[in-house]
Amino acid sequence: MTDKKISLPEIKTEQKSGAEKFLMNGIEQSFSLIDFWSWNQSDLIENRTRGILAEYIVKNALDVKNNDRIEWDDYDLITETGLKIEIKSAAYIQTWAQEKFSNISFDISVNKRSKSERKSDFYIFCLLDCKKQNQINPQDLDQWTFFLVETTEINNVLNSQSSITLNALRKKLNHFECKYYELKKLIETIGNKSN
């Protein structure tokens, strides 16, 4: 017996406010979506959450209006001018106990769904660049350093390599290093030149 083939179209999500209550038998419960967010994502230093936070920070730096975040998409953001951006993050300090700073490395592996191609126009590597545990604060935009690299540069120099260290990024790739307040002007300038 074979499974019956079904067709499930993409689910279009709506942005939530956080006030939405959980339900049981149609009755609102005492806890809401913002309670879940607070419980689940208060650790902004943790790798997964920090990565999503980096996407959000870049979204705001570039003034991207689209509010939809799609997990596992071919790229993370698309600017108002149509530039497709892939965002990666790293940090020296982690939530867990450490005997040394983390080695800085960024994932540049090809999205398996993309048929062995990097689909973005640019990578923005986001480094939470604080080395003082008692001062680290991912919401402090001054603590972030950004590295902008054209995807064609990554493809030409690194081919199918799956990661790159910060040291190798600085030595091997033509890149632009900046702070938060410089990011929008930089992407607009570089993006216009590459079009």
Image (cartoon, grey):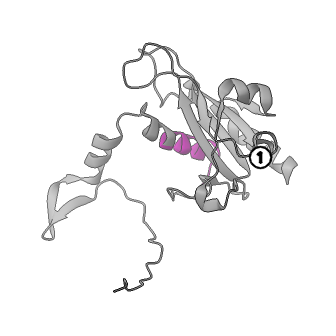
| Percent coordinates x, y for residue 139 in the rendering | 47, 31
Q: Which residue is mark 1?
A: 155
Q: Is residue 49 left or right of residue 35?
A: right
Q: Main secondary structure of the magenta part?
A: helix
Position of residue 180 relative to residue 115, above or below, is above
Does residue 61 belong to the magenta stretch? yes
Q: Residues within 10 Å of mark 1 (few under 14, many from 20)?
A: some
Q: At numbered mark 1, what does the secondary structure look like: helix, strand or loop?
A: helix
Does residue 46 belong to the magenta stretch? no
Viewer can see residue 185: no
Tell me the quarter of the image containing the C terminus. bottom right
| Percent coordinates x, y for residue 44 in the rendering | 42, 34
Position of residue 192 relative to residue 93, above or below, is below
Which stretch is magenta?
52-65
Position of residue 126 relative to residue 100, above or below, is below
Which residue is at a point 36% across and 56% down the rendered structure image? 17
Q: Nearer the viewer, residue 82 or 100?
A: 100
Amino acid at the residue labelled 1: Asn
Q: Image quarter for residue 48?
A: top left
